Image (cartoon, rainbow, N blue to C red):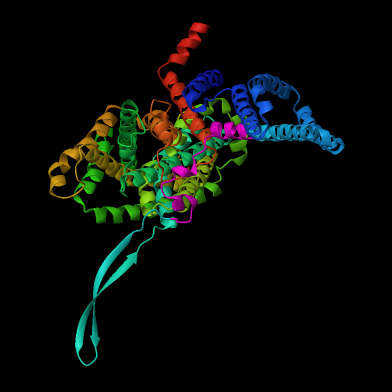
Amino acid sequence: MTYGRVLLVMTILSILLDNLTIQAFSSTSPIQQRIQSRSNLFFGQHSSQTGSSSATTCCSNSRSRRHGFTNLYSQIVEQDEEKELLFSSANSNTTTTTTTTTTTTNSNTTTTTTTTTTTITTTLHNNNNDTTETNWWMDTIREKIGVVDDSRMAIPEYASGEITRMFSHISYSDETTTTTTTTTTDAFVTSVLHRPGSTMGATALVAGTTIGAGILALPAATASIGFVPSSLALLVAWAYMAISGLLIAELTLNRMGETGRQNIGLLELYQRSNLLNPSLGILGSAAYFFLHYAVMVAYVSQGGANLGIAWTDVGLPGEVNPILEQVAFVTIVGSFVYAAKPKLVETTNNILVVAVVATFCGIIGFGATSPTLDLEALVAPSNQHPDLLLDAFPICFLSLVYQNIVPTVVTQLEGDRSKITKSIVGGTLIPLVMFLGWNAVLLGNIMNSDVTTVVTDPIALLQQSGIGNKNSAILSDLVSIFSELAITTSMIGFIYGLLDAWTDVFRLPLEGPDFDKVKLPLFLAVLLPPLLFSLNNPSIFLQALDYGGAFGVSTLFLVLPPIMVWNERYGGGGDDDATKKKKSLTSPPMVPLGKIPLGSLWKAAGTLIIEQGGDKLGVWDFLQTQAA
């Protein structure tokens, strides 16, 4: 049933894609173009001949042109059937002309000259026709794929790579130097300091942002599918998310060139870049808030549960109520971010990130050497279920989210397209390798567990006491610590992300007296909604991430960016299509193959949204029941 649903949705989206892009692909029919171009060449050649011929040939111009156009149409039809015969005919005409010229007498000199000219002209026509036909096919292919003309580049040197940076981070400082000769004088010297962005630092930023709550949900989402199909899903998701990040970087560069500002936020691209109609702009903003709040709900739910496990592990008496666990978690993290200075929050977050990396390495090390690891069962064909593959994509996409910091990366790297590409590709490749290893270790260690039928979440399974030997007990503790640290660091980032979004919506500053007046209401707007949703359903962690990946990530990062890039490069197919195609651009395309990856991206995301939406609403089950 899953394969049938996917095939049906893909077929519908293919039709929609063809209808959407038909204006961008439209052109005069091939036969009309070729007739027009050849008739122009034919008439043009005869016009030049008429000007240089005697008066006796002028009176037959109109008749010969009509006759020539009729022969021209017949020649085109013949060419479509036998192109090789046309080329050999052209060579034969040249040979005949040479022979005729050689055997002509003096009395027929005028006739010979006319014959020679006409024959050579026919050969030139054939050559020009062949060139025109080749150029037409090449232009058609280029138009189908999508090419941005170099004349649209606002800064040709930047587009060609001759100039690598769009701007430079330069700071000035005044220093006082004392010069002692016969008298002592003080001189002020202005120092110029250039702080170029670090590719390594930007790569680490992308990688650190990518590693979040999604990694905790991966084993639960892939356990029923199998390691091999889920690994394939991760690879596909990585490719799509890397392309998405590069498209957002391209949009950011062009927006910087258009506005002259370095600091461009993600919401600004959706709301104020005029690349989306108002409805899609609102959809982008709604998807942004939906994704962030859905993930925050998951953080609160799992963070509170981890606090309860820690309470038990340290030997404290009694059990903590799930409601108190979640309230305590939100209070601890939210109060710290609210009261602490940004520098202290940054330092604390960096320490926690180091602890996340250390515990992750410990999990891989102990998990790979654990006696409960069963590699044969991990890759056994009986444990692979590719028919359920589509259900894993929402979590796979969510696990690789980093696009909200792409504008920051573009600014840090001074608009250097080569560095930006390396940072995005490399920064997402590192988490991909980590996720594959994480999935293999956790799934491999629970394959032969006796309680797999009771607990379907591998992380919850490993957190249970009494599973395996001492190494497994250590692995259980490391998984719990890693889970809590990863959620805490990610939640800090999402709190700042939502604060930035709300201040952007209400046009508020991020610091200063005006911000202090509304600081408490903003923090309540960020923290209270996810807490209330989580309290209503304490086990909502996986469900919240699943919905966020299926609808939030797909809409925000896989559907809207390719539409925006399409409109910016090739026009949107509306009344101002020609104007959009002539719009100056700062950056050339950062993803090759033109329209192909754009259509592929939003078509795949659209398939996921429709399939998952129908599944969660029960549409497919209803149709299946009706069909039965």
Residue 409 in the image: state x and y as whole percent.
38, 50
From this viewpoint, is residue 271 visible?
yes
Q: Which residues are magenta?
A: 135-164
In the rendered image, the residue lying farthest to the right is 103
Along the line of sight, which residue is nearer the eye, 220 or 494?
494
Is 34 one of the magenta-colored residues? no
Rendered location of residue 619, percent (x, y): 44, 14
Query: In the image, 618: left or right of 305?
Result: right
- Which residue occupies 65% across, 32% down? 45
Residue 584 is situated, as x and y percent measured from the top left of the image, at: 40, 42
Q: Residue at x 41, y 53 (%)?
A: 202
Question: In front here: 201 or 547?
Answer: 201
Q: Decide if residue 444 is on the left or right side of residue 412.
A: right
The residue at 34%/31% (across/down) is 284
**628 lies above or below 322:** above
Prevailing secondary structure class for the magenta stretch in the rendered image: helix
Q: Which quadrant is home to the N terminus?
A: top right
Q: Is residue 329 visible?
A: no
The relative height of residue 537 versus residue 269 in the rendered view (above or below) is: above
Along the line of sight, which residue is nearer the eye, 491 or 424? 424
Position of 251 compared to 183: left or right?
right
